[in-house]
Structure formats: C-alpha cells, structure tokens
Image (tube, rainbow, N blue to C red):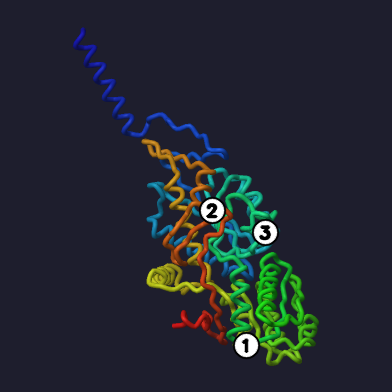
Amino acid sequence: MYKRLLIVISAVAILSMLLSACGTKASTYTCTDSIGCVKIGPTDPIHIAYMLVVAGPNAALGTDSRNGVEIAIDDAGGKILNHDIKFDGEDSACSADGGQAAATKLAADPTIIAVIGTSCSSEARAGEPLLSAAGFVTISPSNTAPDLTDPSSPNHYAGYFRTAHNDKIQGKAAAEFAYNFLHLTKAATIHDGSLYASSLVQVFADNFKQLGGTITLQTSVTIGQTDMSSVLADLASGSPELIYFPIFMPEGAFLIDQARTTPGLENTKLMVADGLYSPDVMNAAGASVEGVYVSSPVVQGAAYDTFVAKYTAKFGTAPINIFHAHAYDGFNIVKAAIEKVAVVETDGTIYIPRQALRDAMAATANFQGLTGVLTCNVSGDCANPIIGVYEYHTGAYPPILIWPTEYVK
C-alpha cells in the first residue's frame, strides 16, 4: 500500500511538471500599472495599428510610411517576443475629421498596443485625445507641428511620440536656404489653415525676418480651393522673390501651376515643404513643377541603401515619399520598448503595462535608426534631423538634393 501511494504521488508530480512545461501554469503576474496592462494569450498576436492617410490626393504620404513599417516587420521576422505581429489600421484622410473618425475606431479596440501615426498634424490634433485616453502609445513618422510636443499646448497628449522632425527646425532651415543660399531678401507665405502649414509658415517668416529679410505678405487659401488667382495677384503686388507655401495636395499643385501664369510672378521662385514631397506633385503640376524647391529630411547611408533595395523589391517601386524611414524607425522603437517592459509568463502569455511602455519610449536613448541616432524626450520628440532642400524637375522623381551642399552626392 505504501509503495502504491508513492507511485501515485510520483505520477502526480510528473504530470504536474509536464502540464507546467506545456503551458498550463496559472498566471502569477498581477498588473499594477497605473493605466492598465494588455494581456496577450500564448497564441495571440501583438497588435500594432496604423493611422495614416492611405487614400485620396495625399495617399502617397501615408502609404509610404505604412510600407516602411511592413519592411520593419519583415526584418523582425514577423514577430515580437515569439508572437506574431498583427498590423492593420485606418485611413485618417489627412484631415481633422478623418483623424477623429479613425481614432474613434482604433480607441475602441483594447488589443492595440501602439499606433504608428498620424500622417498629418491635423489628424493628431483631433485623434490623439482619443488614442491617449485609450492608453495607447502613438508614434508619428510625419507629424511636424511644434505644438504637438509642446507640454504647454492643449494639443500635447500623454503617450505621443514622433520620429519626424519638429517644424521649428524645418522652418528655420527653409529660411536659411532662401536668405543665405539663394540670397533672396523678399518673401511671401501661404498656408491652408491646417495646423501643419500655419505653424510652418510662421516659423519660416520669423526666421527670415531675423536674418534680415522682408515678408511682403502672409495670406492663405482654403482646403478645396481650386482658383488661386486672387491670392496670387495679391502676392504679386508686393513683388516677392520667393513664395513659401508648405501645404498639401491638391491645392499645392494648383498654386504651382497658376503662379507660373500670374503677371508679376514670372521670375518668382516657389518653395514648398515635405507635405508636397510626392510623385503626385510632379504628375499634377506637369511642366510647372520645374525648379520648385521642397524642404524635407535628408536620409543617407549604407543601412538606408539596403532598406531602399528591400522597399523596391517588395513594392516594385522606389520609395514614393520621404517618411518611410521614419516609420521604420518608429516601429522599431516601439518594438524595443515592448521587449523592455513586457512580462512573459512560462506558458507564453505576455502582459504589456501601458504606462511602463510609455516610460520606456520616453527613455529611448542613442537608438541606431535609419534616420540617425535617436533619443526621445518626455515631450515626445525623438528625431535627430538633417533638413535638406530638393529641386523638382519636370517628369523626374524624386527631386534632387541641392542643399546643404555637404550632403549633395
């Protein structure tokens, strides 16, 4: 009888060990994170979503970023912590309304860990309150408006980060290019009422004046406007040497085309910003695009060349915008932060504490990315940008880098 009892006890112990090894061990983790944890079952995927403009006249901007994330996922073997990555998302239309609609859908899904987005700053202004309240981490490859990472701004929300540059840097670079490189002293600006454009023209104007230049007129167009003749005639009356209009499609192409035939602007130079770094600009503006300047980040190096080769092989085209590398880096920063804070149970269950993930994102330092060595701050800025100016030529894409001269190949 005693021997039988020992045999039964031993069998039970062995069975318990086997069950534990097979992943049936009860969870021992208790979430104490201040904004909660995401529980991911042993066979469940880790859910990363996008919120980008992937349709309409500005689709190249978001599609290019989404493509960058897809390559990052490929490079990760499709997994984080041995769990498959689920990657889906919403079109946010590069508008406040689109941002709010997309964020409403995403915020309702508690399985989402992080969101790659948004494309446009106006989307972030409307959508980020919902994403932040849901506890998500958001990292944008292309938002550049200064107030999004300004702690004193009502548009700054917890959990928001970006690998895109701050327009305080881009606007200053554009002014320096116009004044110091082109040797121009008279400029005018146009915005479209968006957060991005309004902020950027003001930074440009302030810096241009500080350098010694004169702003002849600051004016605006409306989203959806097609006839730019009255705005351009007003600008022509001040005889600007350059018009700076960092807006989006399709209004940007209308301005480029119509400026070429406006009396008094025949010799006026035209300059736009990264929102108009797109093959859509070249196609829509036709021959009028010749000589248009566009400011945008400079991304170079062996690692980037390898990335471009993967992009071309996967999508059958070279990159179609400028923020693919920023999206690639954004995803990898999220991945590293998840790996840093995740609690992994013996059965493969993962807990991701949401506030700890935000803290890990903010603590990112000396991250080796395609866009440089990145360090995030608590306000959300992670970029280490070099802003360049490129020149469009009719029928040719991408535009050619012309400044800063030390980066011109």
Q: Of marks 1 and 3, which one's residue comes earlier in the chain?
A: 3
Mark 3 packing: few (<14 Cα in 10 Å), some, or many (20+)? many
Q: Position of residue 367 (x, y in %)?
A: 43, 59
Q: Label 2, label 1: how many angstroms apart (C-alpha)?
A: 45 Å
Q: Residue at x 75, y 74 (%)?
A: 221
Q: Label 2, label 3: how many angstroms apart (C-alpha)?
A: 16 Å
With respect to residue 257, does 299 lie above or below? above
Where, quadrant-wise, is the C terminus in this rendering? bottom left
Residue 182 in the figure: left or right of residue 406: right
Where, quadrant-wise, is the N terminus in this rendering? top left
Disc 1 on helix, strand or loop? loop
Please name the residue that numbered disc 2 is placed on. Answer: 49
Q: Nearer the viewer, mark 1 or mark 3?
A: 1
Q: Of marks 2 and 1, which one's residue comes earlier in the chain?
A: 2
* Quarter of the rendering containing residue 222: bottom right
> In the rendering, which numbered label is found on residue 98?
3
Residue type, mark 2 in image: Ala
Please name the residue that numbered disc 1 is placed on. Answer: 183
Q: Residue furthest top?
A: 1
Q: Residue at x 74, y 68 (%)?
A: 193
* Quarter of the rendering containing residue 277: bottom right
Q: Position of residue 158 (x, y in %)?
A: 60, 49
* Quarter of the rendering containing residue 123: bottom right
With respect to residue 303, does 344 lie above or below? above
Residue type, mark 1 in image: His
Q: Position of residue 199 (x, y in %)?
A: 68, 67
- Residue 89 at least partly seen: no
Q: Position of residue 302 (x, y in %)?
A: 38, 72
